[in-house]
Amino acid sequence: MLLGYLRLELLRTVRDGGFLIMSLAAPVMMYLLTSHMGGDHPTHADDVRTLAGMAGFGALGAVMTTSGGIAEDKKAGWLRQLRLTPLPTVTVIIGRGITAMFLALPPVLAVSLLAGLVNNVSLSAAEWGEMTALLWVGIVPIAMLALGCGYLIEGAKAHSVGLISYLMLSVVGGLLIDTKNFPHWLAKVSGWTPINRYKQLATDLALGHSMNTAALAILLAWSVALAGLAVLGYRKGATA
Amino acid sequence: MTQTARRSRTPLRTGSAVNFTNVTKSYGDVHAVAGLDLAIDRGETVALLGPNGAGKSTTINMLLGLLANDGGRIELLGREPQEAVRAGQVGAMLQEGGLIPRVTIKELIEFMRGTYANPMPLAEILEIAQLTKLADRKADKLSGGQAQRVRFALALCGNPELIVLDEPTAALDIQSRRDLWQTMAAYAARGNTLLFSTHYLEEADEYAERIVVIAQGKVLADGTGAELKKSVGGKTVSIDLGDWDPDGFSRMPGVSQVEVRGARLHLNTVDADATVTALAQSGALRNIEVTGGGLEEAFISLTSGNNARSGS
């Protein structure tokens, strides 16, 4: 059942040709711009942070567009139709969640490729693999947030909330400007966001550091909480 | 049942399909459904008829388990609504229901079929819904009538024995409406149960064996179209009064009430034929007019709430 649903949602997504351009344009331009600014010889660690930040920025933006798409499905009556099938709630959430995460793949891969080929960021094969894998898998809590917003919020408002979440999380999470340049209090707030910890884990993997357990715990806690929001949202939003 | 079901299922056609017992549902202070009792047997085709805001959609949403009832009991095919829906025993066609862009009709139907344990075969669905030639068309590039047939096809996927349709023909032109009814009637003719809501009186009269009139969240009347017309009682025969004595008319056959309005005499009658014959025999026919007796009058009379004979 999951595969059938996933297939349908992926088909719809892939056939919407615009998704690729939309999800790639902002992160690729921003990455090329920021990585060539500031003359004072960035260290390898700085380069990796910029890379993870911009790939994450792309992933976040791509995934958040899902909330608007789901709100449109709701308006079209598609969610009620789904509710009248035997598909269990969890199956719908997993299927829709993977579809949302699928959107994060192009920006993560594109920014990583640019880093390696154009910006000469040099990582081992394992480091590349682990970092990109985390940049993809680690976007789970945001995918769940996008689902929850889409199921619970009506129409155009869901688009706006998605956009605002995207910008807020990008800034506060330290994707655009690294948290080491933040005032102390903001860096502290940032440490509680899933996006900040997501970037931290990806950076650590790329630099060969060991996993920060606090970061992992915070990211997991957000994933569970926001998955709960998505489930609740579907149960509530698909009936009205 | 004389129906021979040769197709994908040989169903049992006995027992109750829908059972509402004293069901209530409120939104704040508004009692959308106020003590609704409704029993539908398997194999019946029933219309739920009522004005806007009568509680039709609320009733259907509760029936499908999309909305929880506040009080009372709802059973579908002997089980909880959600169980019956999940088991594929109930198919539903909702208002403006679920057609998504960028997938073909066939892909959409195949997905739906995949969610059920024992779906109806694809070819059979396409045939019943008259979609065989349109199978590869994108679901968002259809005319109103075609889109509605796709929604009907989606309701068929689980091979249901009860199909619930919320205003299936609203916003369709006459030809599309006829086409859709042809497909729905064919499915009902296999011995399946069909429950549809409508505000088209002719549609209820023409396609349903039984009409359930609801208003203010309650069942006001329940019966065949003919029974409903009869229950509201009679027609009005009116003539120019001239210098006749109105009191004399009250003893004429069929007449239940006499009323003078201006120069016209209005006779309410339960048997218009007999009344008119008597009028003719007594030479009182002057500008005769017989009105009423349609389902529309019955419906208005029932739902306006001031008819003493309502609720039969």
Image (spheres, coloured by chain):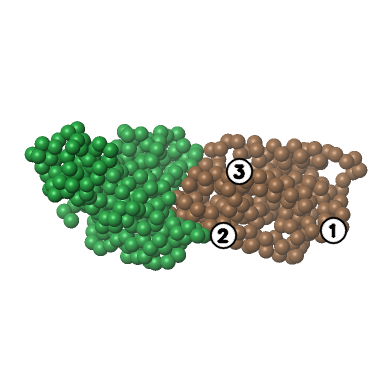
Give the drawing colour for chain A. brown
Give the drawing colour for chain B. green
Tell me which amino acid carries mark 1: Trp
Distance from the alpha carbon under mark 2 to that under mark 3: 21 Å
Label 1 neighbour load within 10 Å: few <14, some 14-19, many 20+ = few
* Image location (x, y in percent) of residue A165: 69, 49
Mark closer to the chain start, 1 or 2: 1
* Picture quarter with the N terminus of chain B: bottom left
Q: Chain of mark 2?
A: A
Residue A234 sits in quarter: bottom right
Which residue is identified by label 3? A156
Distance from the alpha carbon under mark 1 to that under mark 2: 33 Å
Distance from the alpha carbon under mark 3 to that under mark 1: 34 Å
Tell me which amino acid carries mark 3: Ala
Which residue is identified by label 2? A232
Label 2 or label 3, whichever lies nearer to me, is 3
* B199 horizontally vs A193: left or right: left
Does residue A235 appear in this view?
Answer: yes
* Image location (x, y in percent) of residue A197: 74, 57
2 and 3 marks in contact (CB < 8 Å)? no
Which secondary structure, mark 1? helix
* Image location (x, y in percent) of residue A96: 55, 51
Mark closer to the chain start, 3 or 1: 3
Q: Where A139 falls versus B108 (above or below)?
A: below
Label 3 or label 1, whichever lies nearer to me, is 3
Which secondary structure, mark 2? helix
Tell me which amino acid carries mark 2: Leu
* B193 horizontally vs A55: left or right: left
